[in-house]
């Protein structure tokens, strides 16, 4: 194999290259695995023994010269590209506008709701995302056999197995534990809302997420009734949806309230004529609520004979979906700028 001829041809090829991509292909062709230089080294073993040493020196020389030639060519092309860029840059052109970030739609909705409640005299308080079973279940009057305590519904944190059930740590399933925490440390009258993230061990789909945002509300005083609750919620919905919206209460059940009810608002999409958003009923469910159960007051250190109140919980994601006409809750968490930049 004529090594001098291969070297002359390779160096001639290298000089004609005018892009870094071409140099990369050239390097693979000659110095890559199975390349021409590799073939040269393989051919040495077939040559007469007396010539092998000389051929080995020439092959190493070829490899080194091509390597240095490739480095030199890459440097030349990079410097040339820099000079070309400087020549083509017009300093008189206006700069490119930099895109600015903005508030996430869920944050915007959460702030709006908190502002409305603060305008009605409520304080905004927060609590921990990691709770124990006492605050998340027991203190809120959940029966020991309630399905929400099962692993398939709640995200429990791995810990010592011999801990008492009420001390087991978990990702809170609702913001309601903050009711207990607040009433333990503050005497009535109580008037608070609690925004925060909650976690559920469930399958994600268009209307369910493994984590989402809630807004809890609590009002406790000596003479609080359902009428007070309806006045507060009607005012909230009127201000948040900025329109003529009707509100109704339906009987329901929650362990921590008695009586309990679901709150519906008239569908703002079809004006109660019936559509897919309201399932042809003319009404959209927006939150669950009720009068605070006497056991919850007792667990908070209050005497239910002296104090009473209402509590409610709403999904921030759901409120945003209704307000903006969004059909898939997963869009809020997708990070898709095509969606987020609309707000």
Image: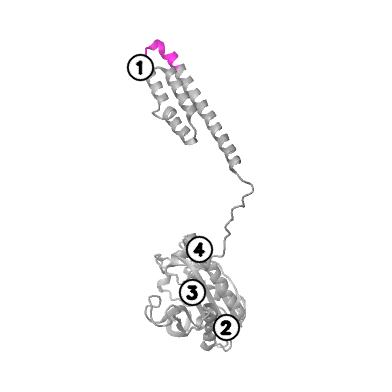
Asked if one can make out residue 26 in the rendered structure from this viewpoint, the answer is yes
The residue positioned 38% from the left and 23% from the top of the image is 39
The residue positioned 43% from the left and 74% from the top of the image is 144
Judge depth for marks 2 and 1 and give the one in front.
1
In three-dimensional space, the C-alpha distance between marks 4 and 3, rounded to whole angstroms, equals 15 Å
Above or below, comparing residue 174 to residue 73 in the picture: below
Residue under circle 4?
A: 340
Neighbour class for label 2 at 10 Å: few (<14), some, many (≥20)?
many
Q: Quadrant of residue 55?
A: top left
Above or below, comparing residue 234 to residue 166 in the picture: below
Residue under circle 1?
A: 46
Q: Secondary structure at mark 4?
A: helix
Residue 254 in the image: state x and y as whole percent. 45, 79
Of 244 and 288, the residue lying toward us: 244
Above or below, comparing residue 135 to residue 233 in the picture: above
In three-dimensional space, the C-alpha distance between marks 3 and 1, rounded to whole angstroms, equals 81 Å
Task: Point out the stretch of residues depicted in magenta.
Answer: 46-56
Residue 210 in the image: state x and y as whole percent. 44, 65
Asked if one can make out residue 335 in the rendered structure from this viewpoint, the answer is no
The residue positioned 41% from the left and 12% from the top of the image is 51
Residue 209 in the image: state x and y as whole percent. 44, 66
Residue 220 is marked as 2
Judge depth for marks 1 and 4 and give the one in front.
4
Q: Earlier in the sequence, mark 2 or mark 1?
A: 1
Residue under circle 3?
A: 323
In three-dimensional space, the C-alpha distance between marks 2 and 4, rounded to whole angstroms, equals 38 Å
Q: Earlier in the sequence, mark 4 or mark 3?
A: 3
């Amino acid at each position: 194999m004529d090594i001098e001829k291969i070297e002359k041809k390779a160096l001639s090829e290298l000089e004609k290259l005018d892009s870094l991509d071409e140099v990369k292909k050239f390097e693979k062709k000659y110095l890559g695995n199975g390349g021409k230089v590799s073939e040269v080294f393989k051919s040495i073993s077939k040559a007469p023994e007396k010539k092998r040493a000389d051929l080995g020196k020439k092959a190493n020389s070829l490899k080194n010269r091509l390597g240095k030639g490739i480095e030199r060519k890459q440097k030349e092309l990079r410097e040339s590209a820099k000079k070309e860029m400087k020549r083509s840059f017009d300093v008189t052109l206006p700069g490119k506008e930099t895109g600015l970030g903005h508030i996430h739609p869920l944050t915007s909705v959460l702030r709006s709701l908190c502002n409305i409640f603060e305008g009605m005299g409520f304080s905004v308080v927060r609590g921990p995302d990691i709770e124990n079973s006492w605050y998340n279940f027991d203190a809120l009057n959940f029966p020991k056999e309630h399905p929400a305590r099962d692993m398939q519904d709640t995200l429990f944190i791995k810990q010592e197995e011999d801990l008492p059930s009420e001390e087991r740590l978990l990702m809170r399933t609702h913001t309601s534990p903050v009711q207990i925490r607040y009433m333990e440390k503050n005497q009535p009258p109580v008037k608070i809302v609690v925004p925060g993230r909650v976690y559920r061990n469930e399958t994600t789909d268009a209307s369910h997420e493994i984590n989402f945002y809630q807004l809890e509300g609590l009002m406790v005083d000596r003479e609080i009734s359902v009428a007070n609750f309806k006045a507060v919620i009607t005012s909230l919905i009127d201000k948040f949806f900025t329109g003529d919206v009707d509100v109704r209460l339906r009987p329901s059940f929650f362990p921590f309230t008695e009586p309990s009810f679901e709150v519906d608002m008239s569908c703002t999409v079809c004006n109660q004529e019936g559509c897919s958003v309201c399932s042809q009923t003319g009404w959209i469910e927006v939150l669950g609520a009720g009068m605070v159960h006497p056991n919850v007051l007792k667990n908070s250190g209050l005497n239910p004979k002296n104090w009473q109140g209402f509590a409610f919980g709403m999904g921030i994601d759901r409120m945003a979906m209704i307000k903006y006409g969004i059909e898939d809750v997963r869009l809020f968490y997708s990070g898709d700028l095509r969606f987020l930049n609309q707000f």
